[in-house]
Amino acid sequence: MMNGLLIHTDEEKRAIVDLAKVLISNAGDKGLAAAYRYVKERNALAIAEGKITRDTLGFNPIVTDMQTAVLVGQEIGFQNEIIMSILLNRCIQAGTATIDEVKELFGENVTKILCNLMQINSLYAKSPTIESENFRNLLLSFTNDMRVILIMIASRLVMLRGLFDSNDTDARKLVAHEASTLYIPLAHKLGFYKLKSEMEDLALRYTETEIYAELSRKLEETAASREDYIASFIKPIERQLKMMPHIKFRIKGRTKSINSIWQKMKKQQRPFEQIYDLFAIRIIIDSEPKNEKSECWQVYSIVADMYTPNPHRLRDWLSVPKSNGYESLHTTVMGPEGRWVEVQIRTERMDAVAEHGLAAHWRYKGIGSEKGLDNLLASIRDTLENISEESATESKFKMELYKDEIFIFTPKGDLYRLAKGATILDFAFSIHTGLGCKCTGALVNGRNVPIRHTLNNGDQVEIITSNSQSPKQAWLNIARTGRARSKIRQALKEISAKQADMGRETVVRKLKNHKIEFDESVMDHLIRKMGFKRLTDFYQNVAEGIIDIADILKRYQALTNPESENGDQPRSADEFTFISEKESKDSSDVLVIERNLKGVDYKLSKCCNPIFGDEIFGFVTINGGISIHRKDCTNARQLQERYPYRVIEARWSDMDNQSNLFPVTLRIVGHDDISIVNNITSLISQEKGVMMRGINIESHDTLFSGTLSLLINDRIKLNKLIAKIEGIKGVKQVKRG
């Protein structure tokens, strides 16, 4: 049965005939009948030539295509273009029909859908499942056409149904796992609850066979008593509703899916016998659009008068529908025998959307809207793009598509829909990118909160901004929605590009001032020689002052005119000999730093500002001088690894150093308080051997951050000063810059 010449079994022949009747009779269009005859002839030719074989699971592809077409037709109506595309797909794969021929015979729309289906064919050609990254990229290529996504979901459900009779346990588990992590979350996001529920049950059946069998058996054993209970619960509601002739209704009770029951058992950590809400009652009203909400609430009042509702379990998706178009009123009430019962109240229109998602606007005239569909697909696209950028795992993909929603209000009463767990930053970017980039916090229900504050359903939020604010790399860890993270990345790239442009302009200007022509190829060679993989990284370092522009000038001159610039080549540390008369016991390769050191051109590096008492080393610069760095300097490791021949051991002299003052920068973070600056400056003014050169404090909501510029004698005094500042009330952290 696996591969080889395709021969229809008697059962498959009957299935093909029956499926064809369903397709043609439901379409009610002679065009589809003619298209089916065309497909039938091309498939027969392909089978005879051995171009159509059973797939990797042994399924007859002709049968599965027709089953997929019927399932799609049941969801969105038997539209010729979609049905034709599904049936013609096999002919294109086999080569018995061409895209140009199909376009001429059946039109542009059919061809467009077929081109998307061809992408799916190529990924599933060798395996019944694909990786989540490929799946994600596939969806991104046609998220504008939900018909293709529906075909994918329907095709997977047909495969899951077919595996019911398969003995290949491994294949069943593999396909079920893929459905659970990729297709079921996608069906959930799109609102295809009917398809989603069946896929969930089949996936559970194949992956947790014993659990599924046990729950199925228990449901069957309790079916009679459950039906009696549902009837007794519904009867008084029906009697009361019939007394309201303006309300036309129907009531149905349904047992929840086996997978849903299993998830409840795991979440509540209870056995089957203690799960009481095994079923839901659905009251469906045949209502005029203008009366939908009022009549739903009238029905709710009748139910609430009859049975005590649980106030924490009221879900109002009438006022604010879900992003996939779902509208309904849910309440959980205490029924007879002290059992909780979920009651869903909705109209016929809402029920159609609930069953078929926003695709119902194709099946039922006037249901849903193009705007709603576009918004939903845009939301899915944002989610997929975000996951793709982060190279997410399957579990991340599943989690993103399953996220619940919350609703947030602006001070003017405008409503915004966000994923559960969204922060102030997410909300700001959902309104406008410019607002997000300048966001410093918000007023939530009148209370001041920082940008990382997690929002709750129904919050009223007013964003606070500052012109001095700009996006930070750390914001990517604060934002929870794909849209916000995507906008932050884009803003960070723009900032990096601007900094790189500034750095490049600085280099060009420096060369021009020295009457040196800028040569792009020479500069590229120099940048690679310095160990940078990207030009933008190098120019950013220049703009931020991490790289000394004078050093770049010397290196550039050495490359362009090596003979005349030999005197400016970097010297090896071996060329230097340091002898201290007062420290004759020292070896000759140690530089001893003291106030009256002569014969050596050295300077204290500005990148780390070493002070007396710090552990230090020397680094021979390109012009022959020596820069002194702290051993814990951020550049230390890079210098020591890339230029070990230019590193010199160094230490401070043991002589008294009280007359020397060294520049130091301290970074301070704490709780914002009107007296905090006064307390800090007052403390420093009382310290001997410490001189304050400047202070800069910025407030961020309830916190402040700032820098202190000081002159100080030595490290011991600095450590004592840091300890004293940390002791000031409100100061959370003090670090040396």
Image (cartoon, rainbow, N blue to C red):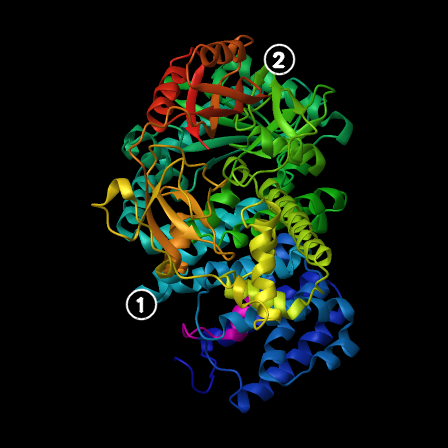
The alpha-carbon separation of the residues under discs 2 and 1 comes to 62 Å
Residue in front for this viewpoint, 294 or 422 = 422
Q: Quadrant of the image for the N terminus?
A: bottom left
- Residue at the spot x=57%, y=51% of the render? 384
In magenta, the rendered stretch is 56-67
- Residue at the spot x=51%, y=76% of the render? 13
Q: Is residue 708 above or below residue 167?
A: above
Type of amino acid at the residue the image marks with label 2:
Gly
Residue 425, percent from left and from top = 59, 32
Residue 452 placement, left or right of 643: right
Residue located beneath label 2 in the image: 446
Residue in front for this viewpoint, 275 or 424 = 424
Q: Is residue 240 visible?
A: no
Q: Is residue 519 above or below residue 246?
A: below
Residue 21, percent from left and from top = 62, 68
User: Mark 1 Cα within 10 Å, few/some/many (few <14, many 20+)?
Assistant: few
Task: Tell me if residue 167 is in the magenta stretch.
Answer: no
Earlier along the polypeptide chain: callout 2 or callout 1?
Answer: 1
Q: Is residue 594 above or below residue 112?
A: above
Assign a secondary structure to mark 2. loop
Residue 523, percent from left and from top = 62, 65
Residue 2, percent from left and from top = 39, 80
Residue in front for this viewpoint, 248 or 63 = 63
Q: Looking at the rendering, which quadrant does residue 633 occupy?
A: top left
Assign a secondary structure to mark 1. loop
Residue located beneath label 1 in the image: 167
